[in-house]
Amino acid sequence: MSIENNSAPAASPVLVVGSVAFDSIRTAKAESGKILGGSATYGAIASSYFAPTRIVGVVGTDFGEAEIGRLRDRGIDLEGLQIDQSGETFFWAGVYSDDFSSRETLETRLNVFADFKPTLPESYRRTPYVLLGNIQPSLQAMVLDQLEPGSFTVADTMNLWIEIARDALMDLLPRIDLFILNDEEAEQLTGESNVFNAGPKLLEAGPEIVLIKKGAHGAVLFHPEGLFALPVYPVREIADPTGAGDSFAGALVGYLAAAGRHDFATLRKACAYATVTASLTVEALGVDGLEKAGRAEIDRRLDELLAMTQIR
Amino acid sequence: MSIENNSAPAASPVLVVGSVAFDSIRTAKAESGKILGGSATYGAIASSYFAPTRIVGVVGTDFGEAEIGRLRDRGIDLEGLQIDQSGETFFWAGVYSDDFSSRETLETRLNVFADFKPTLPESYRRTPYVLLGNIQPSLQAMVLDQLEPGSFTVADTMNLWIEIARDALMDLLPRIDLFILNDEEAEQLTGESNVFNAGPKLLEAGPEIVLIKKGAHGAVLFHPEGLFALPVYPVREIADPTGAGDSFAGALVGYLAAAGRHDFATLRKACAYATVTASLTVEALGVDGLEKAGRAEIDRRLDELLAMTQIR
């Protein structure tokens, strides 16, 4: 695999598993038309700024050279991307409320994703850093079944799985190292509206580490060695929050892989990289902001975040 | 004035002006009965952990030796506390929603506060650090009229004054150094729900520095030298949020006075002291948590907050 501009060839590889999709997004200011989306897409592009990144997912007949080219341009290894000739790519259409505090799904067409079974190429089974992007917990578990022992595994989720696949999600949690979710999902899972109570309860459910994202209010990391709290990188105008969480998770795992470590100090810095990378995503429609930013802009924002959180 | 335990005799003095009151607070778990409250009370007790503190306010005939003694035990100079024999002390009764996200006023009796005019004893007119606690902006302005030039002035406010005394508040802002308000109030004043837009708009309204508190989500400081964002000190069980903002402001001003400076770096650390001091207030009914904590517990929490916000 060749790694192109803005990446870090010396780093350990990252495997990102999730959805590869087309989205149609409507906001108060814009209507996207059919654009590239999906949890694995955002996660892999974000990760690719830090480490060589591999993707496992499925696309259909409408996923063309243009889309493939965009992933390839980020140096993403596509050996694990299944092309299913039986139908079209997963499609999601949604509309955000004017202040982006909520969104409504207008249409979901699972298409080829309905029968998706993640299958790891032999060469992916020993990936040291793995992001189980937001898909059904049962599919996330299938990835774990195929990995050789020793990977550091990070899983993201969403409210839908907590509603309709809670048992599978609870079964997954003891098998992963780091569980990422947002504050609403944390409350939905634990019944605790206070993140400082939800976090310890989630740790009891099995993962070694828990990270609760609070949207515009930053994130809190619950680690065996203690708490870490991080404010958000300041974004003055949101264009489209789609994929922010996936980008956050992708950058976090990518940074860990680049560092080759996942100790508490490295995780803290990874959270900081995650929040600035997610800020790029929300500032433009779809993956555009994330894709065009470049590593230099990520590093510039990191320096800004470090400066604005420095107390002593 | 004699300064007693837990205070910092070498620091510059702080003047706190605001309400001194009796409150009656109902939460899902407790009913307080008639207890000591008021913006100046919380602010002055918080400040007294850091610097010699003077108070200007008014109380009525029901404010007894017990209440006076509690303020005096914190070393607070009471020369500016007017005792109005014409009636009783300001009284507020309120009830919080179960999750503390909202509160309803059950009763307000202004009593002697209705005719209150803050009057600074001659010796208070040259106080280097002044907290204009949450009272009518017109009364806050009267304090500024009586101060010799050179004080660093901090003003707090509340939604009520934005509704009914907006012009007086806008007139006040160019006259103060630091304006403290919460995110809802910032939105109410500026129409901006995003604090990163509200902050700059508030700076345009006149104060040199703006601090927006976000409740359980920390605070953001808007300073000519840049932004500072601070997560909240983790509180796992809230008993009573009354006075949290006043305690925050009091500790902030007290720390500045103790440091004898108000540069950006000192303000950052003052914000950190403010959030941990406010955490003591919310953990118990009324001023009890704040009053009993002691400076050692404040410093212990500060160390914890510094550790949990450290990135590098």
Image (cartoon, coloured by chain):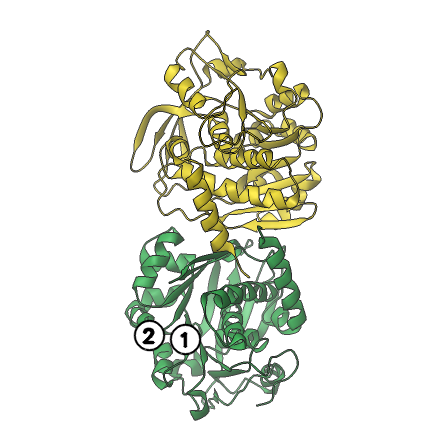
Chain colours: A yellow, B green
Q: Nearer the viewer, residue B28 or A225?
A: A225
- Image coords of residue A241 (percent x, y): 41, 37
- In the image, what residue type sits under mark 2? Arg
Asked whether A270 or B80 is in front, the reply is: A270
Q: Residue furthest bottom?
A: B122
Kindly identify which residue carries mark 1. B153
Asked whether the residues under the numbered discs 1 and 2 touch, taking CB atoms below 8 Å apart as contact, a structural biologist would say: yes
- Residue A291, horizontal then vertical, whole percent: 40, 31
Characterize the local packing of mark 1: few (<14), some (14-19) or many (20 or more) Cα atoms within 10 angstroms: many
Label 1: chain letter? B
- The chain identifier of the residue carrying mark 2 reads B
Where residue B42 sits, quadrant-wise, is bottom right
What residue is rendered at 63% in x and 50% in y?
A227
Q: Quadrant of residue B111?
A: bottom left
Instruction: Give the residue pinned by disc 2.
Output: B175
Disc 1 to disc 2, how far (Cα)? 8 Å
Label 1 secondary element? strand
In depth, the one of A117 and A197 nearer the eye is: A117
Tell me which numbered mark, 1 or 2, is placed earlier along the sequence. 1
Mark 1: which amino acid?
Answer: Thr
